[in-house]
Image (cartoon, rainbow, N blue to C red):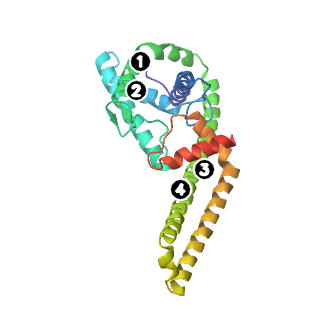
């Protein structure tokens, strides 16, 4: 056990990505009472489970016969992976694709005690129960067949990552564009409100200031119109694709963009 070549490690990664996707999709589908193709990618793979399994196997290699150390090292390795993955994805895409903010003893919403303990239990189940039949299955596949399957998967995996990342970037652009519209609209509302409140005083001001105020309003309205047109164009071109990633991650949130993210989710849902 644990003495594998590169193609076998890739094979394990594929299988655990698939197993993780099956478990997550069933759980989330039951929770939301409809089928959910769970995960960041289009295909039936959840990379965090694949990487998590590989990290657990490496971390527990020296102590695989010690259940307590297997639990602790597996929990630590997988928890660090989950935190780093969640943090990096939010920094890049401005969206949390999982959020433990309301779970007890969480850290920035990326990890929580309950999930970390679950990772530890999974480490024991993986090394003591699950991996043995998976290992027997994979090691019975001829090397040539396994290497071909691995190469096909790697090509597909790279394509899926690129396509899914493009959807996530499209979603990010829409969130930012929507915020520009909201910011300009608020600024325009303030100017109009001030003008209405001080109408009598404004009427007495000199013509130059009136013209300056009018020019500012017109400038903002032009920018607002351009921002709305840009946003509508983004909706038309990539809105439906961007919504796919929200369908696969119904629990996604954006602490950075708050209501703007919720508004985009609602708008894109209508385009589906």
- C-beta proximity under 8 Å, tags 4 and 3: no
Q: Residue 85, image x and y in percent?
A: 44, 39
Residue occupied by mark 2 = 56
Q: Residue at x 53, y 46 (%)?
A: 261
Helix, strand or loop under label 2: helix
Q: Residue at x 44, y 29 (%)?
A: 52
Residue occupied by mark 3 = 170
Residue occupied by mark 4 = 179
Q: Is residue 41 above or below residue 190?
A: above
Q: Residue 96, image x and y in percent?
A: 47, 41
Q: As drawn, is 237 to the left or to the right of 129?
A: right
Helix, strand or loop under label 4: helix
Residue occupied by mark 1 = 127
Near mark 2 (Cα within 10 A), the count class, few <14, some 14-19 or many ≥20, is many
Which is nearer the N-term, disc 2 or disc 1? 2
The residue closer to the viewer here, 141 or 160, is 160
Q: Residue 146, image x and y in percent?
A: 61, 25
Which is nearer the N-term, disc 4 or disc 2? 2
Helix, strand or loop under label 1: helix
The residue closer to the viewer here, 200 or 126, is 200
- C-beta proximity under 8 Å, tags 2 and 1: yes
The residue closer to the viewer here, 109 or 155, is 109
Q: Residue furthest front?
A: 200
The C terminus sits in image quarter = top right
- The residues bearing labels 2 and 1 have C-alpha atoms spaced at a distance of 8 Å
- The residues bearing labels 1 and 3 have C-alpha atoms spaced at a distance of 40 Å
- The residues bearing labels 2 and 3 have C-alpha atoms spaced at a distance of 34 Å
- Give the number of the mark in front: 4 or 1: 4
Q: Is residue 102 visible?
A: yes
Q: Residue at x 58, y 48 (%)?
A: 171
Helix, strand or loop under label 3: helix
- The residues bearing labels 4 and 3 have C-alpha atoms spaced at a distance of 14 Å
């Amino acid at each position: 056990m644990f003495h594998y070549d590169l193609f076998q490690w890739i094979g394990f990664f594929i299988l655990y990505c698939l197993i993780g996707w099956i478990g997550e999709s069933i759980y989330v589908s039951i929770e939301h009472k409809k089928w959910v193709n769970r995960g960041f990618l289009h295909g039936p793979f959840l990379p965090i489970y694949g990487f998590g399994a590989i990290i657990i196997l490496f971390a527990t290699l020296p102590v695989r016969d010690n259940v307590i150390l297997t639990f602790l090292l597996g929990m630590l390795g997988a928890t660090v992976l989950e935190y780093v993955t969640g943090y990096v994805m939010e920094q890049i895409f401005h969206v949390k694709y999982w959020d433990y903010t309301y779970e007890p003893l969480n850290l920035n919403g990326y990890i929580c005690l309950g999930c970390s303990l679950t990772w530890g239990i999974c480490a024991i189940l993986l090394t003591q129960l699950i991996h043995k039949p998976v290992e027997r299955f994979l090691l019975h596949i001829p090397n040539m067949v396994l290497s071909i399957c691995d190469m096909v998967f790697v090509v597909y995996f790279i394509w899926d990552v690129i396509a899914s990342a493009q959807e996530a970037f499209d979603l990010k652009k829409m969130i930012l564009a929507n915020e520009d519209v909201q910011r300009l609209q608020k600024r325009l509302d303030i100017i109009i409100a001030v003008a209405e409140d001080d109408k009598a005083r404004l009427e007495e001001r000199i013509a130059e200031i009136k013209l300056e105020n009018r020019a500012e309003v017109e400038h903002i309205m032009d920018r607002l119109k351009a921002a709305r047109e840009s946003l509508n164009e983004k909706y038309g071109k990539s809105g439906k694709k961007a919504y796919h990633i929200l369908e696969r991650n119904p629990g996604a949130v954006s602490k950075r963009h708050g209501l703007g993210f919720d508004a985009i989710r609602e708008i894109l849902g209508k385009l589906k």
